[in-house]
Image: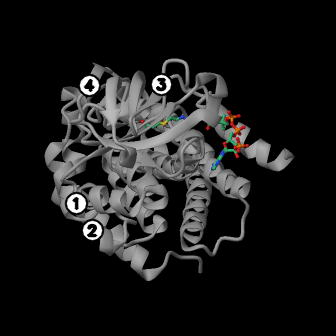
Amino acid sequence: MFTLPENTLMIQQAAKEFVEEYQIIETSMKRDHTHEFPTEIVKALGENGFMGMFIPEEYGGMGLSVLDYVVALEEICYADAGVGVIMSVNNSLVCWPILKFGSEEQKQKYLAPLASGEKLGCYALTEPNAGSDAGSQQTKYTEQDGQYVLNGTKIWITNGPQADICVTYANKDVSLRHRGVSAFVFETSTPGFSVGKVEEKLGIACSGTSELVYDNMVLDADNMMHVKDKGFAVAMATLDGGRVGIAAQALGIAQRALDLAISHAKQREQFGKPIATKQAIQWMIADMATKIESARLLTWKAATIKDQEMAGTCELSREEISRACSMAKLAASECANFCADKALQIHGGYGYSKEYEVERLYRDARITTLYEGTSEIQRVVISASLLK
Ligand code: CAA
């Protein structure tokens, strides 16, 4: 029988117990209404090793695999996808690029506080004119006496209002497009940094999303990550892994929608019988379950590939790795929207009420086909690797 490794099953169980201990399902509706950032839960996620799961122990992490991470993340997102995205960004978009591309000094400085939850990270790539066209980075950096001066605005940054550490990108010459881009990691206490407009969103309400403004923000030479002018490759490689995290988030939403739909269909009676006896409902349940199972296998496959890549044992090309990650995200995010929609349909009018969790799932699912690359961008990545 196909099954997860024993250790991964233990991590999955630990994540389920965490959800139970901190009553994340029970409190999810309240956070959706208040939009309150879950400070205590994030602190506890850090204390329990969920904020830097694949960071090696020598840098203060758990030394687990990406597969362990996606399985745990699905459980957290099953309970509350808003909490889950905070964890996802910290792990995939901040810890991972520092681990992969950071200098030894950067790893020593940033990874332990990020992994313990003492500090929170954000990843700032998107700009008003650089959304799907991420290579069109307008945030500019100039070099002055061995330092870098950054000016520009980033938008839609998850964890932006709360972050202590930021991985970001700036261009030395916008006419060079992605070839002038470098990656930086810095503390948000740096003078010249400020949080701009905080967004009111359709879903994942408890996570913070904002503009970030760099106004003559001076960074030292050792804030630059990787190699000068090679920052776009850092951004893209990081997003490959981030997309696997969002796939896990989408799976959590989809599975919760399916479980709620099944439970409602069994207890809601119409025409003298539970609606679960109707073929119209049965087919929706069957389609939901099949889509979840397929997307989950793609997600586990992509996570395993990312583990092999990190271990240096992956025989796939860069394009094939990107394809696997994009396929997982495309399938899982479309599946989350499908399942949330069908779960709401099965709930009928109740599903449209804010008293019912499926109403929130419907809104939470919507972001998954947008951030970390829209479904259309995933199709661009997948087809480019096939048609090359
Ligand atoms: N790894 C390493 N390098 C990569 C790469 C990868 N996965 N993908 C591309 N590259 C390299 C290419 O090899 C190429 O290198 P050379 O210049 O040396 O040839 C370079 O990057 C440019 O590649 P492309 O020509 O393919 O780039 P493009 O301009 O056509 O863009 C794209 C490709 C796929 C559309 C890309 O821009 C993209 O992914 N867009 C979507 C952006 C996105 O996902 N944004 C999400 C924001 S983050 C977010 O949402 C976070 C949050 O807060 C939750």
Q: Amino acid at mark 2?
A: Gly
Q: Earlier in the sequence, mark 4 or mark 2?
A: 2
Badge 1 or badge 4: first in the primary sequence: 1
**Location of residue 212 with respect to 166 vertically, above or below:** above
Q: To which residue does mark 4 refer? A: 194
Residue 288 in the figure: left or right of residue 104: right
Residue 177 in view: yes
Three-letter residue code for mark 3? Thr
Please identify the quarter of the rendering in which residue 63 is found: bottom left
Q: Residues within 10 Å of mark 3 (few under 14, many from 20)?
A: many
Whether disc 2's CB lies below 8 Å from ligand 1 is answered no
- The circle drawn on residue 116 is 1
Q: Secondary structure at mark 4?
A: strand
Looking at marks 3 and 1 on the same chain, the residue that comes earlier in the sequence is marked by: 1
The image quadrant of residue 174 is top right
Q: Which residue occupies 72% across, 57% down?
A: 320
CB at mark 1 closer than 8 A to ligand 1?
A: no
> Mark 3: which secondary structure?
loop
Query: Which tag, 4 or 3, sits closer to the chain's start?
Result: 3
Res. 9 image quadrant: bottom left
Residue denoted by label 3: 139
Badge 4, how many Cα within 10 Å: few under 14, some, many 20+?
A: some
For image coordinates 29% across by 26% down, the residue present is: 354
Q: Amino acid at mark 1?
A: Ser
Say the numbered circle drawn on residue 60. Answer: 2
Residue mark closest to the camera, 3 vs 2 = 3
Q: Are marks 1 and 4 in contact (CB under 8 Å)?
A: no
